[in-house]
Image (cartoon, grey):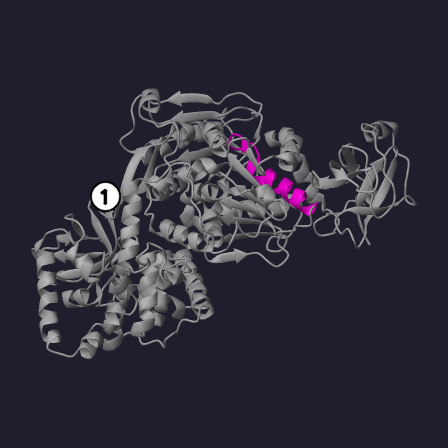
Amino acid sequence: MHFISTVLLGSHMLSVVAGAGFPWLPSKVNQGGAKRLHPQKQARGLELELSLRVGPELPLYSRQVWVGGAWLGVSRTGCHPDTSRSCWQVLWTATMASGLAEESEPSLGESELAVNPFDGLPFSSCYYELLEQRRALPIWAARFLFLEHLESSPTGVVLVSGEPGSGKSTQIPQWCAEFALARGFQLGQVTVTQPYPLAAMSLASRVADEMDLTLGHEIGYSIPQEDCTGPNTMLRFCWDRLLLQEVASTRGPGAWTVLILDEAQERSVASDLLQGLLRDTRLRNLPGDRRVVVVTDPALEPKLQAFWGSSPIVRVPREPGGSPTLVYRDTVPTDLVEAACQAVLELCQREEAPGDVLVYLPSEEEISLCCESLSRELGMLAIPGPPPRVLPLHPGCGQAIQAVYEDTDMSVRKVVVTHWLADFSFSLPSIQHVIDSGLELRSVYSPRIRAESQVLRPISKCQAEARLLRARGFPSGSCLRLYSKSILELEAPPLPRPKVFEENLSSLVLLLRRKQIAEPGECHFLDRPAPEALMQALEDLDYLAALDDDGDLSDLGIILSEFPLPPELAKALLASCEFDCVDEMLTLAAMLTAAPGFTRPPLCAEEAALRRALEHADGDHSSLIQIYEAFVQSGADESWCQARGLNWAALCQARKLREELVELMQRIELPLSQPAFGSEQNRRDLQKALLSGFFLKVARDTDGTGNYLLLTHKHVAQLSPCCSYRNRRAPAQPPAWVIYHSFSISKDNCLCIVSEIQPEMLVELAPPYFLSNLPPSESRDFLNQLREGAAEPTSAQTDSSSAQEYGDGCVLQ
């Protein structure tokens, strides 16, 4: 037995000890150390009638017990079969604190009684400071109602609706952890999903501080290329797409006691699909009595209520305080960065407008430009005190994103420049002023042409309201909208557009097929994807030989679904096992996923010269391999990357991903190969491996001027400005046939990551029915002629020699 906490029983403070048979429930009351309390505190202990008997079964007759600074809720679980006495189940409903902490500062002896039930250690002084902040959050008023619904929901599902900044994302996971603690975490940890990896990492750090636990031990997070969890982790924050992959690979809903789907209004593909997979699961009938909590903005509440049926809903009260002063601009500025910078400078010069500033711009590029301009101009601004601190907030910031939460001197104003990432995530209590551009730049995938478009569009009304509420508080702040009220009313949609309408669904369909193997059934969607998008995804998977004749996953498709890569890249990696270039393809897969290479033109002649030294004659794919190897040889030096215009954080992520892929290939017993980069044989093998997965992404220069016609549709594109072929000195000619990694419809219609190929190799490796299904063009006729020409000499050979000729190309299809 060991000490758990203290119980306030009548006018006595009693210590509670847990027995070996009930590790999380009190089984003995030690009255030896009991002491009399002040009458005011005594009255608080007598609020509820309580009868507590000492014994192994510990019968309790009450609805709540005051334990260590929080109410210990109890609920009836049934009757004993031999007696009429009711049996009760203990439910921890709050984070444990000192029994005296609410009314006064604990003395040394009293504070020693406060023990964290999750790790058995005394609480630190920082815990009590954060506890006071937590109690001031709007969500705290709905605490008992939430726990009651979590215990008694007839469907096992609870909906939570609240505005950004109300404390939902930090407090709900803690209460669910206490709920699971009362059950001994029978089926595993409490899992919290987030639509953005950086949000999962940031929340895990904050919750670990609030619960006075260690990040990486009791509290953890899982994001791409970083798993900060351990064997004792009981509360895990994770990227929703990672959890979806875990669920798709197992029978049943997965290893969790409580699953929290946070920020459902973001409408990520993974979050929508997880809800679809769980909707018809009878959670109450599964072992361990699981629970699902869906957390959303009030704007999506009606849709979720209709989707989840009779599930109870908890509405978080609105935060008290005045509404921010709202100002519109009559017209949208032609230069949003300049307009935003000017607005920030005006705020910083006004003495009556203290507080931090949050600026919303459409894209990462504009965020960087704004930060550079503000850092330069604020340093020269004649204002009392130190200049404001300018901080970017976007996915490319990596772990540096935590800087926006760092406590600094209150006299130093912070200016945080962000985009849609902070619409609902990353609540910053110190924000007093918001500058909203009203626009967002999103990548939207078109299944018809298999290409992404960079779309600059108005934000939704829901996003605009969320941005406005960032300036709500005491005192209320201001919100400047760099657009007119009519634009918001007439052009803005009510809700963010579901991502299932805007992303390539090939990976989604692959996971769905994988789930049908583990557990056949129909998946429901909050909004069903467009039939055209689903058909294109199925067609692409069929071309990759991931589906069998019945439309189920083939053996190859099952292996493809194991990899955290797009299907075509996973297919190229598997093909490298046949062509003996696994080492190079592992590097390339990691670089294509995490580090796109040069993302901007060189800033000076010296940087251009250093870049040219990293470019490979075979094209961008080989250049990426060469960049990675040079990065590793430099010792992963950040200054080395800066001198060449490379993203150091992205290259570090690529290194981690490569290690993960190596471990995965070893686990599923796929062969590895020795490094051979640079040899002529390796060059051909690498091209074959790439074409085995990316034959859908081939283009031909029809006129010798760099105007490339894409084979799968009749769009014309040019090489990216960062392409190695464009950086070569004249009179270098662009390659006639190329394979590309991505095609983006933007102002210049660019092919990104391009390498030269030979059309004969495409005929050899692409499925014959793919070539037959290409739209009519000179390129298709040329490829079919090559195929017929290659078949003529083969017809004179024996069947065995014919099979040998196509062996390399067909073995994985």
The magenta segment is: 160-182
191 displayed left or right of 344: right
Residue drawn 16% across and 47% down? 715
Q: Is residue 744 located in the magenta-colored stretch of the structure?
A: no
Q: Which residue is mark 1?
A: 746
Question: Is any atom of residue 472 visible in this view?
Answer: yes
Q: x and y percent of residue 756 in the render?
A: 19, 64
Question: Which one is in front, 704 or 19?
Answer: 19
Residue drawn 54% across and 20% down? 322
Question: Which one is in front, 48 or 213?
Answer: 48
- Looking at the figure, which quarter contains the C terminus? bottom left
267 displayed left or right of 5: left
The amino acid type found where label 1 is placed reads Ser
Q: x and y percent of residue 134 in the render?
A: 64, 35
Above or below — where is 681 with respect to 518?
below
Q: Is residue 176 located in the magenta-colored stretch of the structure?
A: yes
